[in-house]
């Protein structure tokens, strides 16, 4: 959908204004649906390691810029994370509501893990903070910010080179700053439960094998995407199906599901 909107000019993004956020995602401002000669509605495109989400519904450009400014990396230690001024909260905010709540209620970790059977966190920083919280809570059921921060420090030492700019290697300054802001963000039971329900719906769709998802007739008749069509397309599709079937038969390769090796395991091949 995003590619189609960009191609047709329905969505325009501000060139050169693509900024790293405090959570490791990338944020870019733009406009959506403007008539010729008229400005469109202000939007923010959020790009994470797994998703691209268009945050819309801002009443003014100032509202969009204000939320973007709150998420920009800077010395804002301990400042709570702000929600965007939109009716439907984006996934990034839902994840933060849940993670901030868990930091203050570590005893709910198992309950949340059971309610969310699939991948949850869309940035490395949130994944690492959640993993640090789980480890700290196993050692101390009342683990708080100090214990989670110490465990996060240990995990950041094993961060791969490509993640250096995301976590603030070698000291993990960006990840620690984000943890501080999450710990300062107050999320009540109502917002956390709402986030769990919304994320559970997406998780079920994410973990479904690609070849098992229904394909509409309209989608099946679309032209192949650039670079993916041509005479080799059937072979690629067959190889992809075989690879997915093989991966589905594999067990968990490591005992710790939140370890770096388990997280980097390919869940579905991209061909």
Image (cartoon, rainbow, N blue to C red):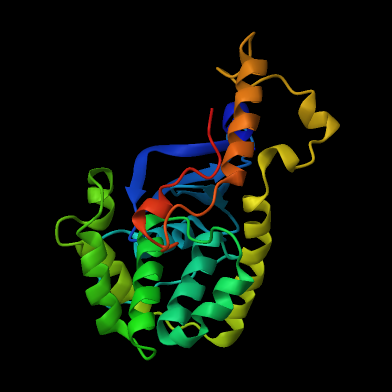
Q: Give whichever of 83, 162 is nearer the camera.
A: 162
Residue farthest along the bottom direction in this orientation: 142
Question: Compared with residue 185, is residue 142 higher up or lower down, i.e. above or below?
Answer: below
Q: Is residue 169 left or right of residue 202?
A: left
Q: Residue at x 28, y 48 (%)?
A: 163
- Residue 77 shows in the view: no
Q: Residue at the spot x=79%, y=36% of the render? A: 215
Relative image position of residue 267 (x, y in whole percent): 53, 45
Image quadrant holding the C terminus, namely: top right
The one of 18 and 154 positioned closer to us in this rendering: 154
Q: Answer with the quarter of the image where residue 248 lies.
A: top right
- The percent position of residue 204, horizontal first and vertical second, equals 67, 57
Would you say residue 86 is visible in this rendering? yes
Asked if residue 84 lies left or right of residue 244, the reply is: left
Taking 151 as reference, is 37 above or below it? above
Q: Is residue 216 above or below residue 111?
A: above
| Vertical relation: 142 (above or below) 62 | below
Figure label count: 0
> Residue most toward the top?
231
Foreground: 74 or 183? Answer: 183
Q: Nearer the viewer, residue 25 or 85?
A: 25
Q: Position of residue 87 (x, y in %)?
A: 63, 67
Picture coordinates of residue 265 (x, y %)? Answer: 44, 46
Residue ranking furthest to the left: 170
Quadrant for the N terminus, please: top right
Q: Is residue 256 left or right of residue 87?
A: left
């Amino acid at each position: 959908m995003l590619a189609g909107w960009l191609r047709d000019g329905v969505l325009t993004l501000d060139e050169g204004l693509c900024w790293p956020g405090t959570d490791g995602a990338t944020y870019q401002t733009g406009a959506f649906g403007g008539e010729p000669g008229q400005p469109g509605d202000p939007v923010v495109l959020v790009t994470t390691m797994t998703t691209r989400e268009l945050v819309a519904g801002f009443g003014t450009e100032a509202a969009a810029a204000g939320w973007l400014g709150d998420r920009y990396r800077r010395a804002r230690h301990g400042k709570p994370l702000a929600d965007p001024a939109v009716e439907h909260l984006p996934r990034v905010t839902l994840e933060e509501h849940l993670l901030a709540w868990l930091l203050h209620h570590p005893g709910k970790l198992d309950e949340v893990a059971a309610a969310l059977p699939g991948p949850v966190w869309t940035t490395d920083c949130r994944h690492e903070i959640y993993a640090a919280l789980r480890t700290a809570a196993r050692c101390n059921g009342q683990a708080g910010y100090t214990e989670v921060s110490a465990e996060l420090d240990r995990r950041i030492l094993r961060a791969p080179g490509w993640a250096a700019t995301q976590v603030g290697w070698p000291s993990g300054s960006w990840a620690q700053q984000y943890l501080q802001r999450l710990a300062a963000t107050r999320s009540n039971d109502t917002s956390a439960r709402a986030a769990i329900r919304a994320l559970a719906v997406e998780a079920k769709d994410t973990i479904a094998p690609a070849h098992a998802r229904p394909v509409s007739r309209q989608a099946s008749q679309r032209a192949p995407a650039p670079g993916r069509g041509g005479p080799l397309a059937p072979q690629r599709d067959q190889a992809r199906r075989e690879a997915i079937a093989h991966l589905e038969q594999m067990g968990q390769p490591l005992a710790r599901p939140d370890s770096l090796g388990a997280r980097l395991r390919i869940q579905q091949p991209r061909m």
